[in-house]
Image: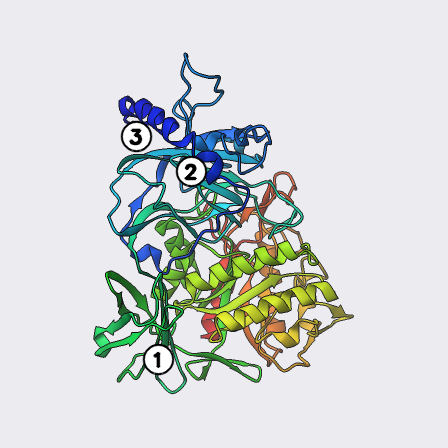
Amino acid sequence: MPRRRLSVSLFRFLLLLATTSTLAHAEDAQPIQPTLLADIDHRPAMSLNGPWHIIVDPYKGGWGAEGKPPGAHGYGADRQPSPDGPLQEYSFVASPTIHVPGDWNTQRPDLFYYEGLLWYERIFDYHPRTHAHTILHVGASNYETHAFVNGVRVCDHVGGFTPFDCEITSAIREGQNSVVIAVDNQRAKEDVPTLKTDWWNYGGLTRDVSVLDVPEQYIDDAWLHLNNDGTIDGEVHVAGEEAGRDVTVRIAELKIDVSAKTDDKGRAHFHLEPAHLERWSPEHPRLYRVEYAAGADRLQDDVGFRTIAVEGDRILLNGKPIFLRGVNIQGEAPFRDGRAYSDADAQTLLGWAKELHCNFVRLAHYPHDERMTRLADRLGILVWSEIPVYWSIDWSNPDTLAVARQQLDAMIHRDHNKASVILWSMSNETPPGPERTAFLRELIAQARKEDPTRLITSAIVTKFHDKTAVLDDPIAPDLDVLGYNEYIGWYMGKPEDAPAYTWEDPLHKPVILSEFGAEAKAGLHGPATRRFTEEYQAAVYQGQFAMFDKMPFLAGLSAWLLMDFRSPTRQLPDIQDGFNRKGLVSDKGVKKQSFSVLQDYYARKQ
């Protein structure tokens, strides 16, 4: 899409004059924390999706002489070189473009393995409203991100899978504006996740980017949840508001129209008593249009109402036991490489899950694009959502804990009004130890405080004593639901061995076998004893089913996994080729034998 080049040069010249005197002050070394707005996908916004100019910066020269942020006079200033001006060795307007949203790895072959700093730039026209806040919204960027508008640093963010919103009111201008976003996906020990994972380290602006206006006092969080007695409790927070502001909640289909006043922290509390409420469930995913109002701000959402609880070793949905027929999903796009970010991606992935007769998915190993949880609400698919506290991270580092806390908070804030989400997961396959357990307990306490209505879980490596699995991980007493991963027939034993294994649940809690499976290359056939054939993978599933049927406390299953995905740890030539091949479907959408094997089993479990 061609840009308006004639005015860009003049714009950049004016930008240089305006920002030279203010950059050093605006870009001090302290991080500028972003905010989070509720249901931002339901607010009017101007999309910045599309082509962005990029500069690949492996030596971090764009930060200036120090080579690290904040870089007061670096690429964030978005200046245009002039033949008669001072030396400048970059130009966004002359640089190539890639598409946003999207990772950079799969858009340019030379960036496939790139890990480091990359600068994005776009010029856009905007007409900000008066008496309003203007917000730059980023759905996700991996990993460390610094955003500039018209040369002013507006926010900094750490983490690869959660949204953030930058206040840009003082930096935005009437008419033409510049936005520069620096994204660095270099792995580090103290990060969450840490140095090594089993998925591709996709870098870039991987989800939607947009600009929007909200009133001076605006709703930044709204939450309603169903109680066991059929009443609804809720809370609406109004940013920038003191006590006494009227806040209204309307649910026309339930004939609810009530108001409450904010307290001294800007919160308004609600207790609703609806008549004839239809509860949300996989069989009946009923959503109600909810309207919130506070002063000049209006916000709409589509909300389902259900309860979730545990009783002994059972999970109760709306007071009734439910068996979770599930599958794991990585956040990669079907049919094409790269991160999933579109409606079509979500519809394909969750459509396959429905075809399998799933009522449940585990979105591994990080918060997925919000389109997934929105669609799960509409389709009636229950969700396990997880933060990437994965394998062994820097347990004793307080900065690492702070990053994990921030990601947990953002995940809960974004999705705590979605009926589909029933489980917050703190971690995956973390090695037991005092520091690890203390770290996870901090996260569990935070999750319970922020959202006491959902269940807490983690995916734990199953430890076997001979052929007996004893589910006694030190973190298990702190969880509501125990998630255990096991790979009998793949990493241990043979497919036919699985029925001989026994399981003990000394805590008498609900257990989900959160991972099980084997690898197979689509189209590779042979005896069921030959690894990586479709027949071997199917045999592993058949052996697992016989074992599951002898586990009376089993509350659910989550097969690993729906679709093949990229992983740099999977190096077997002509078989893996950089992919984890445990999918029931190939990365190109080809269903393997195990798809129908699991489909038939789940059909019998309905």
Nearest to the eye among marks 2 and 1: give it: 2
Mark 2 → mark 1, Cα distance in angstroms: 44 Å
Q: Which residue is rendered at x = 47% and y = 59% of the image?
A: 410
Characterize the local packing of mark 3: few (<14), some (14-19) or many (20 or more) Cα atoms within 10 angstroms.
Answer: few
Identify residue for label 1: 232
Dot 3 amino acid type:
Met
Nearest to the eye among marks 3 and 2: give it: 2
Q: Secondary structure at mark 2?
A: strand
The quadrant in which residue 307 appears is bottom left
Q: Position of residue 493 (x, y in %)?
A: 72, 62
State how the image is colored: rainbow
Using the image, determine if residue 77 lies above or below residue 408.
above
Q: Secondary structure at mark 3?
A: loop
Characterize the local packing of mark 2: few (<14), some (14-19) or many (20 or more) Cα atoms within 10 angstroms.
Answer: many
Dot 2 amino acid type:
Val
Nearest to the eye among marks 1 and 3: give it: 1
Identify residue for label 2: 152
Mark 1 or 3, nearer chain start: 3
Mark 2 or 1, nearer chain start: 2
Dot 1 amino acid type:
Ile
